[in-house]
Amino acid sequence: MCTCLDSLQHCSALVTVIMTLQWTAVAFFLYAEVIANVILCIPFISAKRWRRVFSWGIWNWLSPYWNKCFFTMIMVLIVLFLDAVREVQKYSGPEPMQDAKVNPNVYDHVHMKLFRAQRNLYISGFSLFLWLVMRRVVTLLNQVAVSTEDSAAIQTQMHNMADAAKQLEEDNKMLRQTLLDEEKTVEAKNQQLKLDIQKLETQLKTADSAVHRSQAEVEAMKRQAKGLAQEYDRLLSEHHQLQNQPSASDKKDN
């Protein structure tokens, strides 16, 4: 009988030690989560630096196991949280309190168990909460870093586009000035051409007048030459007639 009691006490002590180590490990995990979240929330460490840290080779090596580890820890913490809830309900129920009222030693023991259950509840609950918060913080830091890089790239692109727009505006102004200069040059050339055309028209009119006068003089000279030719023909015919008439001395001789 004593051996059985010793075995039960030994098993109970072993379970107590295991539970103590279990909740001690959960408490240390909670402390590590608090430290990690505080470090992640340090204001003077920018999201870009955290992105550089997260891009180390060791994280790429651990990335295939990260999701499995994350969900495994969630399941473990949920189980511990539900176990702590069960322990709290167990030691805060009416039966332990009735036993505690009967025996003062049991009262202290029940309250000690209830305190430990509530402590374990808080430890597991906050561990689960901070584990989710840490995952979310890491995700947000990566998103902020990507957004910052994209924003910097967009700002650089906008700056380049603004420079290009200014350059195009300057080129447009130069082109407009060149077109205005060319229009002025063309207008001046047109004015000069108009003046030249007017001069040429005046010269053409003068030449036409001279041609008309020359034609009139030629017609007059033609008429005059025709008259002289007719007069020459008349005089020539009279000369022939005079040569053909016999002279007076010839008549006397006959």
Image (spheres, helix red, strand yellow):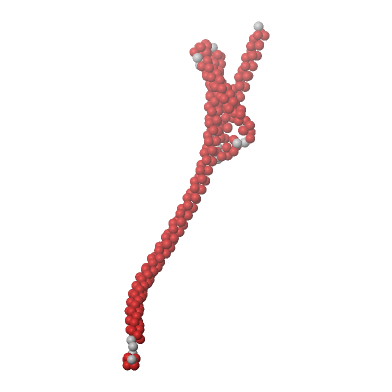
Count of all numbered marks drawn on residues in the image: 0
Determine whether, in the image, residue 94 is placed left or right of residue 232: right
Q: In which quadrant of the rendered image does the C terminus lie?
A: bottom left
- Which residue sits furthest front? 254
Give how far across and how far down residue 218 sits, in percent: 36, 75
Q: In which quadrant of the rendered image does the N terminus lie?
A: top right
Determine whether, in the image, residue 241 is placed left or right of residue 82: left
Visible residue check, residue 117? no
- Residue in the image at 46% along x and 57% along y: 174
- Which residue sits furthest right? 3
Give how far across and how far down residue 21 sits, in percent: 62, 22
- Residue in the image at 36% along x and 72% along y: 211
* Above or below, 122 relative to 106: below
Q: Nearer the viewer, residue 166 or 182?
A: 182
Say which quarter of the image contains residue 134: top right
Give how far across and how far down residue 147 sits, in percent: 52, 39
- Residue in the image at 33% along x and 90% along y: 247
Visible residue check, residue 140? yes
Q: Nearer the viewer, residue 211 or 204?
A: 211
Q: Nearer the viewer, residue 216 or 50?
A: 216
- Residue in the image at 63% along x and 35% along y: 57
Give how far across and how far down residue 115 sits, in percent: 54, 20
Q: Nearer the viewer, residue 239 or 110?
A: 239
Say which quarter of the image contains residue 234: bottom left
Determine whether, in the image, residue 198 is placed left or right of residue 152: left
- Which residue sits furthest top? 1
